[in-house]
Image (cartoon, helix red, strand yellow):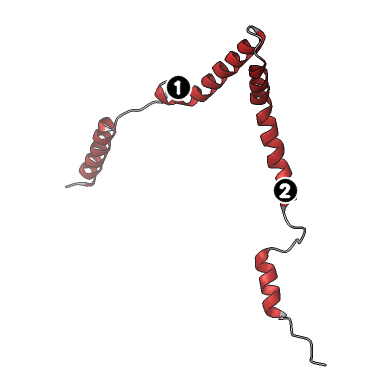
Amino acid sequence: FEEGDVEREKEEANREEKELRPTMQPTGYGMSSAIHALPTILSLVLLSLYLLGDLHWNIPHYRALWMASLLSPLGTYCRWKLSKFNHAPNPLSRCQRQRRRRRHPQTPPPPP
């Protein structure tokens, strides 16, 4: 074999491999995008039914439901941001406190 023959065989093998590979091009449409949009669609339908029950049929229970469903994301966000105040005021981590105790063990007071 000559050098040119080996290179041509490699190029031909690469070309055949590319031809055999399935070509999948993302279209942005399909089942996966429909699945991702489903919770949003269901939430909007449910919210609109709550509004319809309150405004059209004057059922007070539905007023509480649509107001809660609109305000709950804000409450969740506030709880997430306020959770930083739940931690102990000690700035040392638990590991740092344990290391400090090992280095400086507490000795019992001397007997009187």
Snapshot quadrant of residue 12: top left
Give the SS element for disc 1: helix
Q: Is residue 108 left or right of residue 27?
A: right
Give the SS element for disc 2: helix
Query: How many marks on residues?
Result: 2
Q: Are dots 1 and 2 in contact, CB under 8 Å?
A: no
Q: Is residue 89 above or below residue 29?
A: below
Between 53 and 7, the residue placed more toward the observer is 53
Q: Amino acid at mark 1?
A: Ala
Between 112 and 78, the residue placed more toward the observer is 112
Query: In the image, which disc is placed on residue 34?
Result: 1
* Label whose residue precedes the other's in the sequence (1 or 2): 1
Could you give the CA–CA distance between mark 1 and mark 2, rounded to whole angstroms? 37 Å
Query: In the image, which disc is placed on residue 84?
Result: 2
Between 76 and 14, the residue placed more toward the observer is 76
Q: Residues within 10 Å of mark 1 (few under 14, many from 20)?
A: few
Q: Is residue 63 above or below residue 96?
A: above
The location of residue 14, given as percent across then percent down, is: 27, 38
Residue drawn at 77 percent across, 58 percent down = 89
The location of residue 48, given as percent across then percent down, is: 59, 14
User: Which residue extends farthest bottom?
Assistant: 112
Q: Amino acid at mark 2?
A: Lys
User: Which residue extends farthest left?
Assistant: 1
- From the image, state whether disc 1 or disc 2 is nearer to you: 2
The location of residue 107, given as percent across then percent down, is: 74, 85
| Quadrant housing the C terminus | bottom right
Q: Is residue 49 above or below residue 72?
A: above
User: Which residue extends farthest top?
Assistant: 56
Residue drawn at 55 percent across, 16 percent down = 45
